């Protein structure tokens, strides 16, 4: 029986991070498998890429639903149907309500193109250049209700170079994203990290096993 965690990837667009996860998950020793790719946009380029890779795809167009909750109920059911353990948001451009976020708490990851908590939201590369930072990068974190917040699993730094444009910087950050996301997912799927008190704790092989009870209960 496979012990791999089953992953649902949520996309809205081109899906290059999705492809990096699909490719990583092909390795026999990788601790996760991609069970389904779900797009909220019928026009997302990533859908064809997932199909070419032989992954099941589902389109749930948010415009077909009167409320966010109705859309999310359908999304939740599609994830349950695919027997998903973990969700990876990969360029998924839809805000989620507390009900959905809570149901998947510590089981939903997101990738963001900045070193959070700097530059949450959109246009991160333009803003990084405008503010003159010398180090930029990307973050994979667990999803919480507030956009681009939540316990940080892993980050990759990218140097800002003289003459960088938002496009050139975006390109180098994206290359880092494609390495970071598979790494972060493997940390979560293998159980190498867990969340305690809203912080991600890394369990090294030599560490004692994680406590059976939360710190609050042991006190
Ligand atoms: C990436 O930069 C990701 O960090 C952000 O949206 C972009 C999606 O790109 N959340 P892709 O669809 O994975 O190519």
Image: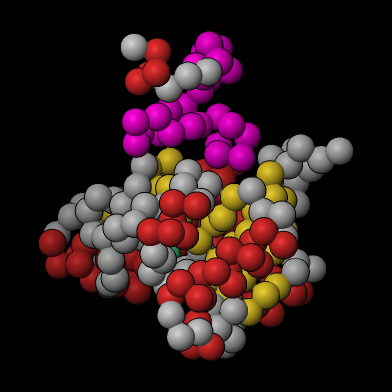
* Residue at 46% in and 86% down: 66
Quick check: can you spot residue 171?
no
* Bounds of the magenta segment: 187-211
- In depth, the one of 210 and 167 nearer the eye is 210
193 in the magenta segment: yes
Name the quarter where the N terminus is drawn. top right
On the rendered image, what quadrant is the C terminus found in? Answer: top left
Residue at x-position 59% and y-position 86%: 42
Kindly give the residue lying farthest to the left in the view shown. 131
Nearer to us in this view, 3 or 54: 3
Question: How far from the left and from the top, in percent, is residue 201?
Answer: 42, 28
196, 13: nearer the viewer: 196
Q: Is residue 88 above or below residue 77?
A: above
Q: Residue at x 53, y 11 (%)?
A: 208
Q: Is residue 197 left or right of residue 206?
A: left
Residue 109 lies in the magenta stretch: no
């Amino acid at each position: 029986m496979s012990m791999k965690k089953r992953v649902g990837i949520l996309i809205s667009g081109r899906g290059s991070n999705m492809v990096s996860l699909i490719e990583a998950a092909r390795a026999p020793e990788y601790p996760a498998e991609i069970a389904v790719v779900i797009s909220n946009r019928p026009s997302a380029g990533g859908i064809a890429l997932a199909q070419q890779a032989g992954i099941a795809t589902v389109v749930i167009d948010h415009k077909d639903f009167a409320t966010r909750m109705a859309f999310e109920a359908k999304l939740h059911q599609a994830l349950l149907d695919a027997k998903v353990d973990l969700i990876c948001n990969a360029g998924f451009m839809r805000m989620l309500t507390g009900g959905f976020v809570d149901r998947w708490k510590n089981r939903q990851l997101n990738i963001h193109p900045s070193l959070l908590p700097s530059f949450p939201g959109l246009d991160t590369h333009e803003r990084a250049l405008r503010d003159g930072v010398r180090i930029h990068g990307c973050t994979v974190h667990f999803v919480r209700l507030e956009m681009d917040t939540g316990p940080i699993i892993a980050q990759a730094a990218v140097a800002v170079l003289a003459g960088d444009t938002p496009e050139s910087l975006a390109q180098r950050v994206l290359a880092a994203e494609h390495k970071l996301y598979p790494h972060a997912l493997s940390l979560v799927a293998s159980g190498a990290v867990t969340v305690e008190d809203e912080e991600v704790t890394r369990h090294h092989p030599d560490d004692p096993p994680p406590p059976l009870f939360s710190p609050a209960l042991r006190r």
